Each structure stands twice: as C-alpha cells, then as structure tokens.
Image (cartoon, rainbow, N blue to C red):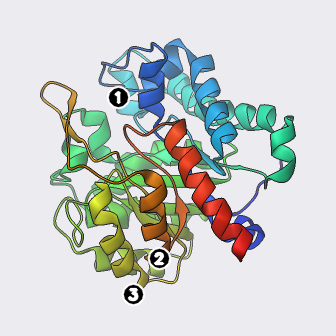
Amino acid sequence: MTHVSIATALRQQRFLTLDGAMATELETRGADINDSLWSARVLLEQPALIEDVHYDYFAAGADVAITASYQASFEGLARHGLDRAQTMALLDLSVLLARTARDRFLQTDAAQSRIRPLVAASVGPYGAWLADGSEYRGDYGLTVRQLVDWHRPRFEVLAAAGADLLACETIPALVEGEALARLLDEYDVPGWLSFSCRDDAHLNHGEPMHEAAALAQATNAVVAAGVNCTAPQWVAGLLRTAAAHTDKPLLCYPNSGETWHAPNRSWRPGTDAAGFAELSRLWVDAGARLIGGCCRTTPHDIREIRGVLAAYNSAT
C-alpha cells in the first residue's frame, strides 16, 4: 500500500483541494440519513453509494477524500445493536470505500494529470454521537483524560485502517483538541486538527482561535490545522489568526453558511455568502493551502474551488 503525506503532496503542488459534504450528496441520491448515525447509517445500508460519492468528488477535483466515519463511534453503533467487532469492521470499511474510489479514479484519463489523491479518515467530535447538536457547542463537561479515553478505541482502529492520515475535525472546544493532539502524538500518526468556530476569532465553545493554532504548532504529529463546519464569512479572519501562531499548512472547509437546528434535525438559512470560487481566493490570501467544503456543499462547489486552486498552482 502506497501512502502519500500531506507534505509530499504540498511539494508537488502548492494548494490542495479537499472534498465536500458527504451527507448532502447521500441525501441528494436518495439515502435516508434522518437518524442519529447520520451518514454512518449509509455505511451499514448502502456502502456502495458512499464509494460513488467519494469517486465523484475525486472526479470533481478533490485531492483529498474524507471518510464517512465522522458519526461512526462504538457507543453510537452499539445503540443500534452492533457489537465491538462489527463496529471495527464498519470503521475499516469507511476507509476501504474511499481507497476503492481512489483506485477507480486512478484508472481514468483525468487522473493522469493529477497527483495521487489522499484518503483522510474522519475522527468526528464527541458531540457527534450524542446527536443533539453539542458538536456545535462543545459543552460536554468532560476532561482531557475523559475525552482521550472516549476517542481512543475508534482512533486506534482508524489509525490502522490504511488511510494516509486522520482528519480530526469539527472540534468545538480546546479541551477536545488537546485530547486529539495527545492521541496523534501517542500513536505517532499524521493528522490534522480542524476546529469549528462561532465567529472570526473563537471556537464554538469560546476559546480563542490563537490557542487552537498554538496547540497545533506544539503537536509533532499535526500536519495541517484550520477550521471546518464554520460559516464562510468567519473563515478569513480565523485563518489570519492561525497563521500568526503556527507554521503548519492551513486548511479550511466551511459549510454553506446555513445553521443546523438539532431539535428538528434541519438546516436553517444562514448569511448569504459569495460563491466558493470568490471565497477561495480570499482564503488563499489569508493563508490557506488546503480548501474544500463541509455541510451542504456539493461536487459543483469542489469543482469551483479546484478551478481557482489549479490557477494558483499553475502560477507557482
């Protein structure tokens, strides 16, 4: 198995395109994700659909695919009747689907002019398994040690599942960032830390972004840092703050600007934002080198981002 590092990919081209939302595309294609497992339900019921979404994001220009393991946890899957061995198999499957989609894409003519894409295994936050929106608040009331202990079983499986790196994402609070940083260093696996933020200076739980950037800087195994599942209008300011406190490559994959309403499991309209092509230029100027989309984004958005970043790559 050939692994490609973020550092190697960024030497091959200065900017990388990340993929977009998984759940949005699954819904568009008819999958029912109205469940506490969210897109992880499709891992159980229609795994081939997930592979097809990964493939379509590669075809749209993504250099990195993020697996559908965000909502897949031992506790969440046990609530749906899966035992430990079945959960481990499902986590492995989430990585295999992205790798298989990559293998399919690498056989196409379009792939011949592209770098080899990477697969990032998603490590979602503690709040995701609660399915009550707390991943957008971070008000768990848990210590770093408690969060390390909760994340460890899934982290261990995903670290050995054959991905190129781990995507520790949608982190709403510094305490959870510290827990995931400890695990990255303990297992000595490359990964990124991506925080979810409530404005242009603070994580959702309230800690300043500069502390999150400093945490990433101090963690040897962190290969990139930034923000995701954050409203587009906050991203440039967050990136500028991060750039002043870390020299790690910066990433961003914001949502569409809509907000999640947990009680009735629906999206509410957000602040109007410019298209992703225009926004990507702003984020490059603010220091981002890896750019994609999160909730409610599509292959069309990733194609727009790819077009912008390809122009920057050609100019460098």
Residue at the spot x=87%, y=47% of the render? 112
Residue wearing tag 3: 244
Decide if residue 252 is on the left or right side of residue 159: left
For the image, the number of numbered tags is: 3
Q: Badge 3 local density, few (<14 within 10 Å), some, or many (20+)?
A: few
Identify the amino acid type marked 1: Gly
Marks 1, 2: nearer the viewer: 2
Mark 1 vs 3, N-terminal side:
1
Residue wearing tag 1: 76
Q: Position of residue 271 (x, y in %)?
A: 20, 50
Decide if residue 161 is on the left or right side of residue 245: right
- Dot 1 and dot 3 residues touching (CB under 8 Å): no
Assign a secondary structure to mark 3: loop
Mark 2 vs 3, N-terminal side:
3
Q: Judge whether 251 appears above or below 304 on screen.
A: below
Q: Which mark is residue 308?
A: none
**Residue 200 at least partly seen:** yes
Decide if residue 237 is on the left or right side of residue 72: left
Residue at the spot x=70%, y=74% of the render? 315
